[in-house]
Image (cartoon, rainbow, N blue to C red):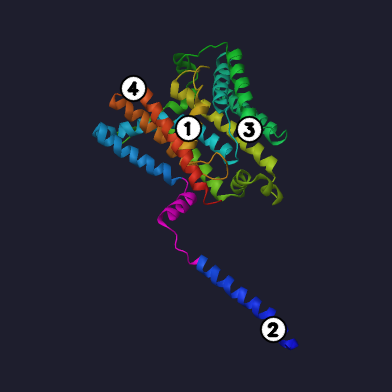
Amino acid sequence: MTESQTTSQPKQEFERVLTQSSTAVASFDTHEKSLLEKLRHFLHSSPASVPLIVLVMSLIIFAIIVGSRFFTPFALSLILQQVAIVGIIGAAQTLVVLTAGIDLSVGAIMVLTSVIMGQFTFRYGMPVELAILCGVALGALCGFVNGVLIAYLKLPPFIVTLGTWQIYLATTYIYSANETIRAQDIEANARLLQFFGEKINIGGATFTYGVFAMIILIAILWYVLNHTAWGRHVYAIGDDAEAAKLSGVRTKRVLIAVYVLAGLICALAGWASIGRNGSVSPQIGQFANIESITAVVIGGMSLFGGRGSILGMLFGALIVGVFSFGMRMYGTDVQWTYLIIGVLIILAVAIDQWIRKVAG
C-alpha cells in the first residue's frame, strides 16, 4: 500500500461519516410533526389560547343551560363588575409569577391600603386626595419590603409573602380596631373614595369605573411585558435567573421593581374595592390572594415562571366569573362552583406540564 493510499483512507472515512450526518440532519429537518405535536407547539407559543377556548366554551354552555337571559348586556357587564377586583389583583400576581415567584400578601396589601385611605380621611381629617396617595405609597412600601427580602436576602417568595401576609393583615386589624367606615359616611364626606364604584350605562350594559381601570391596567401591562426591555427581563428572570444575570440583566433591581409595582397595583385594587363595596372594612378581600392565584393558574400562567400572558390571566378571571354567575342563575349550590373551579385548576396545571415538554 502506497503512502497516498494510506492518507486517503482516513479522508474517505471522514467524508463518508459527514455524508451520513448530513443525510441524518436532512431527514430530521423534514420530519413531519404529528397533529398533537403541532397543537402543543401552538399552545406553547400562545399561552392565552387555552383559557380563551375554555371561556368561549363556558359561555356557550351556560347560554344553553340558563337560556337567553344569560347573554343580556346587563348580565355580561355584571360579570365584568364582579371580576374587576380579582382582575386588578391578578395583574399584580401575574408580574410576580412571571419571575417564578408567588405573592400571598396581595390581598392583605389591598385591605391594608384601603383601610389607610379611609382611616386617614375620617380619623385625622386628611384631604381625601392625600389619604389616597398615602395608601398608594404604603402599597409600594409593602411591595418594596417583599422585594428586598426576596432579591437581596435570597429568601423563598412563598415563605416571605406568607409571613408578610400575616404581618400586613394583623397590622390592618390592630390599626383599624376592626372598625368599618360606613358607605353613608363615605358618600356624604369623601365621594372620591367610591370613585371606582361609579356606574355608566352603555347600550343596556352597566359598567363601573373599576371595570375600565382593570381593562386599562391590563392593556398597559400587556404592552410593557411584550414590547419593552423591562418586560423581556421579567420573562428572562422567570425562565432562568442565573442566565439572565450572566447576560447583563440586573436581576435584583428588576425583582424589586416587580414587587413594588405589584404593591402599587394592590393599592389601586384597595381603592377600587371601596367603590365596589361602598364601605371600608378590614374584613373584605381576605381571600383575594387565593382568587388571584386561581385566575393566574386557570389563565395558563406557568407557576415555574417565564411563560404566560397577562391576557390569559384576564380570561382566567372571567372563567371564574362566568361559572360563579352562571351557576347562581341556574340555581345550584355554591359548593358546585368551587368544585368545578378546583377541577379547572388541576387541569390547568396538568396542561401546563404537558405544554412545557416542548421547551424540554
**Label 1 sits on residue:** 294
Q: Looking at numbered disc 1 in the image, what kind of residue is underneath it?
A: Thr
Give yes or no for contact between labels 4 and 3 (Cβ–Cβ under 8 Å).
Answer: no
Q: Compare marks 4 and 3 and give the one earlier in the sequence.
A: 3
Nearer-the-camera pick, 267 or 98: 98
Q: Residues within 10 Å of mark 1 (few under 14, many from 20)?
A: many
Of circles 4 and 2, the one toward us is 2
Q: Which mark is residue 8?
A: 2
- Please name the residue that numbered disc 4 is placed on: 333
- Between discs 1 and 2, the one toward the N terminus: 2
Report which residue position mark 3 lands on.
157
Q: Report the magenta residues as a range.
A: 29-47
Residue 72 seen in the current view: no
Indicate which disc, 4 or 2, sits on the residue closer to the N terminus.
2
Measured in 3D between alpha carbons, the distance from the residue under mark 1 to the one under mark 4, in whole angstroms, is: 20 Å
Assign the N terminus to one quadrant of the image. Answer: bottom right
Find numbered disc 4 in the image and state the secondary structure of the residue it sits on.
loop
Is disc 3 placed on a helix, strand or loop?
Answer: helix
* Main SS category, magenta section: helix
Query: Mark 1 and 4 residues: CB-CB less than 8 Å, in contact?
Result: no
Q: CA distance from mark 1 to mark 2?
A: 67 Å
Q: Name the residue located 61 percent from the left edge and 20 percent from the top edge.
A: 166
Residue at horizontal 30%, vertical 39%? 60
**65 in relation to 194, above or below:** below
Q: Are marks 3 and 1 in contact (CB under 8 Å)?
A: no
Question: Which of these two is toward me, 308 or 36?
Answer: 36
Would residue 286 appear left or right of 3 to someone viewing this image? left
Residue 316 visible in image: yes
